[in-house]
Amino acid sequence: MLLRELIEKVDKKNVCADMDLDMTGVESNSKAVRRGDLFVAVKGSVSDGHDFIKDAVKKGAACVVCERMPDVKIPYILTDNSRKALALISAAWFKYPARKMKLIGVTGTNGKTSVTHLIKHMIEKCSGSKVGLIGTIENVIGERTLKSELTTPDSYAMQSILDKMCFEGCDYAVMEVSSHALDLDRVYGIVYDVGVFTNLTPDHLDFHPTMDEYARVKSSLFTSCRSSIINIDDEYAHRMIERSGGDVMTYAVNDEAASLVGRDIKVYSDKTEFYASLAGKTARVELCIPGMFSVYNALAAMGAGIKLGFGADEIAAALTSCKMVKGRAEILPIKRDYSVLVDYAHTPDALENIIKTARSLTANRVITLFGCGGDRDKAKRPLMGKIASNLSDFVYITSDNPRTEKPEAIIGDIVSGIETGNTKKSGGNYCIVVDRKKAIFSALDSLQTGDMLIIAGKGHETYQIIGTEKIKFDDREAVDDYYRQTKLNERLRQNIYNN
């Protein structure tokens, strides 16, 4: 592709290159550069691509996009922001795939994964169209699943995935949009047909210095949306509405002023039922996912569906057949007189929601097992400890993804919140088991008839990050191992007894 076509939308300070250069590729990693590539030098949190321009030239780069003049002889384009330039260049390289589909972006602290899956399922049922999904758990093209590492991929990978979706016949794409992706310009230049805001609660405050800054970054999504669907039960809703570039539909459970309101809510052990009211009309909604948060997720999906042109009744019918999302309020099929639930809850608000949901579903005790990630927002650890202790009958504190922190130090931060929780139970209703598998085994050993165990924090994840290494670990597999071992021990005891 000609250089002039690639950089057409880029804000250029200076051009010292032949605009008719034929570029063979686009790359921001100097190690991956091939002869004839356009190398985009991006400043990162750990390294600066400008320091590797010489390496890119040695590998055969034909031109460089950069924020300061290169210290080696090579054609270059100078710009103020090479991150934004990479996003625009990547879109041009793949011939703007986002323009060829209807695009829905979902942002917020909690609920993004569930809402994107509900929207994908709803569109497929209502329109019969092929739908792509970009998310935390997986990237999906129709029925084909691709591996996902980041909530939102970097800008080149993002455009590559959107291009694959177009090539394979997707008419729609649904995307989780994280605050990191927005702040780091991974989705810069993309225009969404519909943007959805779920909620905003403390998270990522190691990356964003304040909640106000976190909200500002999240709200930037809505400047690029033709329509916005906003949860006005959330205290930050006004920030999202203020920056919405198109028309706005609001949804709520507690605010009758909302465009779309959830009423007559009933939560059962295996489902949630409610009525959605819009412009004087109502539609009955039933989801196979228990919990009040399911009402909010369904309303968000309904709002998106209405803006896409589907009717409320057909949306409600589609949502009824949607299956539970892996690792989100997932009740495991253990066939015991107690229940075990796995959930991704890793923020104070999400943990509170899932414990309250469990409380409404169980006849006896709620036992919560969780930890907090290392090298991440430390401020939420004591908050989560306090919430777990106050709302649970007993708490097992363990490791999550400790990364380069000592697990004991992370647990100490959690315990500080329990000890200062100022409730009668605080300080006496928890134990510490650092090894996560041993913690799960201990918690399962303790369960009685009617209890519910929540294993929180990792949800769909199939690994633990210890140090800088990813180690295979799945909460569900740990539960399966427990019951396999229990059955083996029962057989051994029976054999001893018979002999």
Image (cartoon, rainbow, N blue to C red):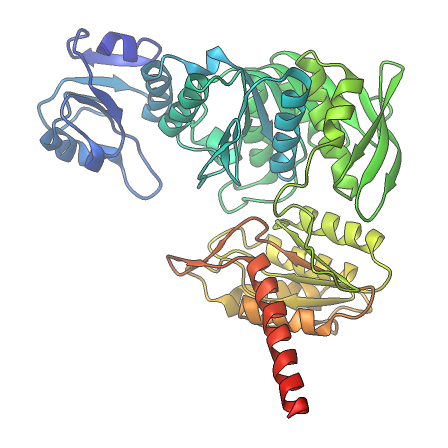
- In the image, residue 133 sits, relative to residue 398, either above or below, namely above
Q: Nearer the viewer, residue 421 or 390?
A: 390
Pick the quarter of the image with the C terminus. Answer: bottom right
- The reply, left or right, for residue 210 in relation to residue 336 is left
- The reply, left or right, for residue 124 in relation to residue 355 is left
Name the residue located 67 percent from the left edge and 24 percent from the top edge: 122
Q: Nearer the viewer, residue 445 or 179?
A: 445
Quadrant in which residue 76 is drawn: top left
Residue 108, how many percent across, how many down?
62, 34
- In the image, residue 315 sits, relative to residue 205, either above or below, namely above
Residue 329, how many percent across, how many down?
69, 48
- In the image, residue 335 sits, relative to residue 189, either above or below, namely below
Badge count: 0
Residue 322, how many percent across, how many down?
69, 33
- In the image, residue 228 sits, relative to residue 275, either above or below, namely above
Name the residue located 61 percent from the left edge and 21 percent from the top edge: 195
Quadrant in which residue 250 is drawn: top right
- The reply, left or right, for residue 324 in relation to residue 58 is right
Name the residue located 59 percent from the left edge and 60 percent from the top edge: 371
Residue 234 in view here: no
Residue 139 in view here: yes
Pick the quarter of the image with the N terminus. Answer: top left
Residue 361, how many percent across, how many down?
83, 53
